[in-house]
Image: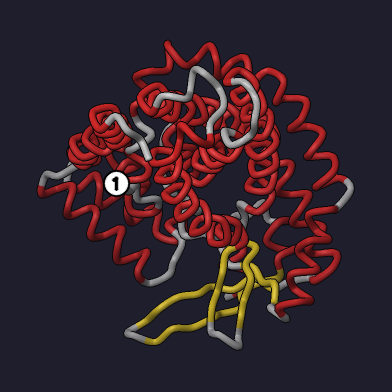
């Protein structure tokens, strides 16, 4: 056990300090999104569309007219819609200090990000061009006996918010995986520098692979599980599987490192619990900057191409249909409107496909 009680308490306060920062940031975010009566009025209009299971593109004209009627700007529309579709929670606000500290951790992030670019291209070649990800999807489908269908995302047609903010919404699992890797590697009998170096290498591989997978699955592709009456979007499947393990694992590893750190850590720099706690925050915020940089750069340059290629591979194997999953007066329905191939040929234009199906 840690003998120095004061050091123990100090290290715990350091680790929980992001929570104290996250709470006021969450209130500031709520104010930035909009809390005035006209903002709540527009929020309710958007929520009604989403509650019906309809993509925003279907009512884009009506929503814009409603916004003009109550004097809600286009920028405010994008904030409200993004908040409803991709609500930020406490785990997201824990990462916000990285936007303030980026001048300090940005150098470390840049050193790690530069060699990541060729690795991203390599993993894209392996997972997409060599159809490894498609093979994994086929194995999952064969093992689970799920159906693969298409359901247009509700955010189709939403006002665009900044790329960095959209990336932050996807970041927690990726970032916490980096922290998870660091805590695992810190058990290795090696120097503190080697621990940081090896952790960076593991994180580069993790974030590169997850970025390619997310770019490929950020589409209408969906697993349908009739046996258990579930619909699972492909892009949330990875988070659904990794999230609980990473969350519980982080709590366990952090607790064990704090309680028995002097016995299980070998590096002189990280032997004391206070420097170790500081290193955890540095790793957390550096991983966040790296993740945002990679997602913005990769998704902007290669995201659409990777998504389209993967969808075509799924069409070649399964030829899935495209459905609307909506609700009308308490009745839930899966309404077939086209094939996924027709959806892609229409450049994922919801109005064009919807009119054709009528």
Q: Quadrant of the N terminus?
A: top left
Tell me the quarter of the picture where residue 12 sits.
top left
Closer-to-camera residue (170/40): 170
* Residue identified by numbered label 1: 80
Tell me which residue sits at (60%, 88%) in the image: 227
Closer-to-camera residue (311/200): 200
Tell me the quarter of the picture where residue 192 sits.
top right
Q: Label 1: state its secondary structure.
A: helix
Tell me which residue sits at (24%, 54%) in the image: 43
Q: Residue 269: in sight, yes or no?
A: yes
**Which x, y percent locates residue 11?**
31, 30
Tell me which residue sits at (26%, 37%) in the image: 22
Tell me which residue sits at (23%, 40%) in the image: 26
Q: Residue furthest left?
A: 37
Mark 1 surroundings: few (<14), some (14-19) or many (≥20) residues within 10 A: many
Q: How has the structure been colored for display?
A: secondary structure
Q: Please say if 189 is above or below 314.
A: above
**Which x, y percent locates residue 239?**
54, 55
**Which x, y percent locates residue 160?**
44, 39
**Which x, y percent locates residue 127?**
80, 47
Q: Residue 73: in sight, yes or no?
A: no
Q: Please say if 165 is above or below 242.
A: above
Say how many tags the image has.
Answer: 1
Closer-to-camera residue (43/90): 90
Q: Please say if 153 is above or below 282.
A: below
Q: Quadrant of the C terminus?
A: bottom right
């Amino acid at each position: 056990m840690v003998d120095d009680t004061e050091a123990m308490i100090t290290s715990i306060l350091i680790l929980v300090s992001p929570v104290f920062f996250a709470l006021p940031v969450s209130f500031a975010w709520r104010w930035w999104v909009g809390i005035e009566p006209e903002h709540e009025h527009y929020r309710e209009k958007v929520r009604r569309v989403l509650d019906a299971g309809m993509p925003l593109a279907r009512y884009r004209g009506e929503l814009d007219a409603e916004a003009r009627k109550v004097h809600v700007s286009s920028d405010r529309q994008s904030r409200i819609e993004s908040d409803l579709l991709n609500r930020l929670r406490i785990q997201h606000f824990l990462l916000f200090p990285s936007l303030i500290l980026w001048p300090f951790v940005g150098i470390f992030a840049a050193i790690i990000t530069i060699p990541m670019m060729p690795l991203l291209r390599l993993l894209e070649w392996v997972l997409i061009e060599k159809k490894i990800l498609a093979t994994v999807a086929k194995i999952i489908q064969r093992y689970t006996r799920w159906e693969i269908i298409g359901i247009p995302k509700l955010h189709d047609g939403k006002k665009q918010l900044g790329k960095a903010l959209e990336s932050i919404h996807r970041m927690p699992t990726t970032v916490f995986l980096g922290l998870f890797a660091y805590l695992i590697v810190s058990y290795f009998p090696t120097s503190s520098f080697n621990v940081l170096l090896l952790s960076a290498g593991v994180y580069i591989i993790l974030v590169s692979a997850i970025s390619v997978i997310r770019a490929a699955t950020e589409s209408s592709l969906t697993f349908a599980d009739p046996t258990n009456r579930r619909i699972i979007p492909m892009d949330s499947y990875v988070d659904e599987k990794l999230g609980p393990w990473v969350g519980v694992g982080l709590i366990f590893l952090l607790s064990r490192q704090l309680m028995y750190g002097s016995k299980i850590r070998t590096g002189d720099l990280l032997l004391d619990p206070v420097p170790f706690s500081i290193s955890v925050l540095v790793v957390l915020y550096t991983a966040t900057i790296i993740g945002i940089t990679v997602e913005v750069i990769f998704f902007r340059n290669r995201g659409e191409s990777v998504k389209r290629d993967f969808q075509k591979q799924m069409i070649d194997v399964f030829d899935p249909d495209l459905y609307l999953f909506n609700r009308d007066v308490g009745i839930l329905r899966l309404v077939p409107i086209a094939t996924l191939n027709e959806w892609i040929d229409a450049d994922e234009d919801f109005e064009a496909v919807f009119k054709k199906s009528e």
